[in-house]
Image: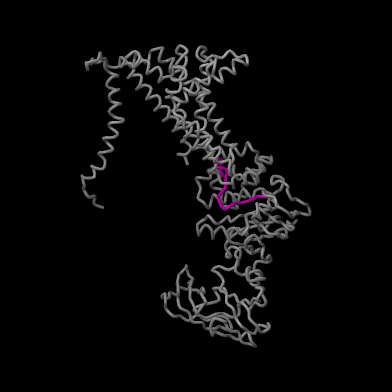
Amino acid sequence: MNKTINQKAWYFVIPVFVLVAFNAAIPLMTVVNYSFQETFGNNVFAWEGTRWFKQILLSERFHAALGRQIAFTFIILLIQIPLGIAIALTMPKKGLGVPVCLILMSMPLLIPWNVVGAMWNIFALPDIGFLGHTLNSMGFDYNFTQQPGDAWFTTILMDVWHWTSLVVLLSYAGLNSIQPAYYQAAEIDGASRWATFRYIELPKMKKVLTLAILLRFMDSFMIYTEPFVLTGGGPGNTTAFLSIDLVKMALGQFDLGPAAAMSLIYFFIVLLVCWVFYNLMMKNEAKS
Amino acid sequence: MSLELKNIEKKIGIDTHIYPTSLKLKKNTINVLLGSTLAGKTTLMQIMAGLDKPTSGEIWFDGENVTGMKVQKRNCSMVYQQFINYPNYTVYENIASPLTITGVKSDEIKQRVGKVAELLKLSAMLNKKPDELSGGQQQRTALARALVKDSDLILLDEPLANLDFKLREELREELPKLFEDRDCIVVYATTEPSDALMIGGNTATLLEGKVIQYGKTLEVYNKPENLISAKVFSDPPMNIAEIKKSGDICKFLDNNVQWKSLAKIKDGTYKIGIRPHNITTYKEGNNPVEINGKVQISELSGSESLIHFTNGNLNWVSLSNGTQQKNVGADTKLYMNTDEFLYFDQNNRLVKNG
């Protein structure tokens, strides 16, 4: 077949190019620009090569922030994924309970992130907050603004409260797509509840769970607003996750070069982990 | 060994899904449940298996009341319209699954799975996973899982409905052979009369939650107890008309077509049922009668031709062998094989076949 040559078709593509350029490519290139140079304002730049990258990669401060970030993400995934599946399994499959449960479950997802932070801040205040006051009156020495352990506990609890619903909704959708005949077949075989979960429900939920883990990984790895409002990274630096540390460096200390280098490293870590994880999860799919 | 349903009834809320039904299925038989969608075939099977409890009535198996006994304790297996297999098990593991759960020794499992796999032509794909197989092979795997168990009761719920035509024909021919030497009761649900005829055994015709007739398949086909059973067991749909009989002469109420009947029934008005293949473009039987028709639709299906035609108020279907192309709107001559007419009285009960 002969292709007709029609250069006018480019006009359809140009708007997309412009949009992507302004909201992704140009900002990213600006950051790349800063990461290789030193600036003292007034648009004066001096070439620094890979100095900022080396500095960040070797700095203890970055290692500590990255360590805290990995620990946080790991803990919340470990809690939210099993908890989400468990809640989805107990949700009703028909009747009035379905819309009620779905609406209740989506509530936390609809609350703006800084409101979540502010809510939990007040909720957890040791003297007047419901959670803080209750814990203290029960004899626990709880103060999230002063004790690192309590700060972590509160941040994790807040994130679990805010985001487990997402895992629940995705798992619920996955479970609902399983035909009832599968359950009957398992019942006829005499399979136990655990075997039904392990060999029917879990494999059938594989795709949505992959998606849930990916989304939760990315979101939690980039978490900023809620811990910023709740603890501000404190006490000390104990809850200063990567993005909080980054903002401190860029806006607090105005170290634009190192901050730009750190942004890029941060970005590549997220990209790399997602890519590796996705490929591992989909490896079996590709085989068949 | 036998499975007996005694006055089974199933209600969900105010809806009756199965009206009081009694049915006795004997050992070593294949029993077809024939009826359209929502006739209650699946509900009835689930009650037989113990997956569902009847609202009232009893189920007896082998002289034992098993009403309300859980499905795990009953020795039965089921194959569904959808191809149900464990997604991350291989074909071998899938077939072996009912045996592994009950703790059969591994050498015995190996031997039994091998035998069933060979029977169902799955030997070459034992190491594959279900989603690497074609639909036909997936359903064969599901069938193998049902057969490997040596169940007393095997339930097949429209097992061929999701297969394409060729695979369907192939598996349909194999099915009766698979169950030949087995010590079990097979129940096979289908919407298609041709399935029932091909599988043979016994047939129960169902309509809207009622078992209309149960008996030997050919007998139910040739001597339907009543008009409903005849309608259920006819595809394309049966042609029905009212006639008046006086002396030897039968005549349609709607037109002047008449024929001589040797049927020894009283004079009066009757309904007759004519299966589409008894109206043809050529003469058949001992006493063919001509009828004129205006062609409404003319369709060829393989080596058969369906002609929908009208004659006065009658709106009928005929089925002839060969490719008989007719123009829509054309007047055409057709012949009815009066030997195979079914005569029903005013209460829709069969009074005479032929």
**B161 and A171: which is toward the camera:** A171
**Residue at 26 percent of width and 38 percent of height:** A15
List x then y, in percent, for residue B242: 59, 78
In the picture as drawn, the residue positioned furthest to the bottom comes out as: B247
**Residue at 50 percent of width and 79 percent of height:** B311
Residue A59: image quadrant is: top left
Residue B82 sits inside the magenta stretch:
yes
List x then y, in percent, for residue A125: 52, 17
In the picture as drawn, the residue positioned furthest to the right comes out as: B63
**B169 and A266: which is toward the camera:** A266
Relative placement, left or right, of A197 versus A67 is: right
Magenta: main secondary structure:
loop
Q: How many marks?
A: 0
List x then y, in percent, for residue B22: 72, 60
List x then y, in percent, for residue A194: 63, 36
Q: Is residue B150 visible?
A: no
* Display coloring: one colour
Residue A196: image quadrant is: top right
Residue A196 sits inside the magenta stretch:
no
Q: Is residue B73 above or below residue B316?
A: above
Q: Is residue A199 above or below residue B354?
A: above
Read off the magenta span.
B76-92
Q: Is residue B132 visible?
A: yes
**Residue at 40 percent of width and 24 percent of height:** A269
**B351 and B340: which is toward the camera:** B351
Relative placement, left or right, of B291 versus B32 is: left
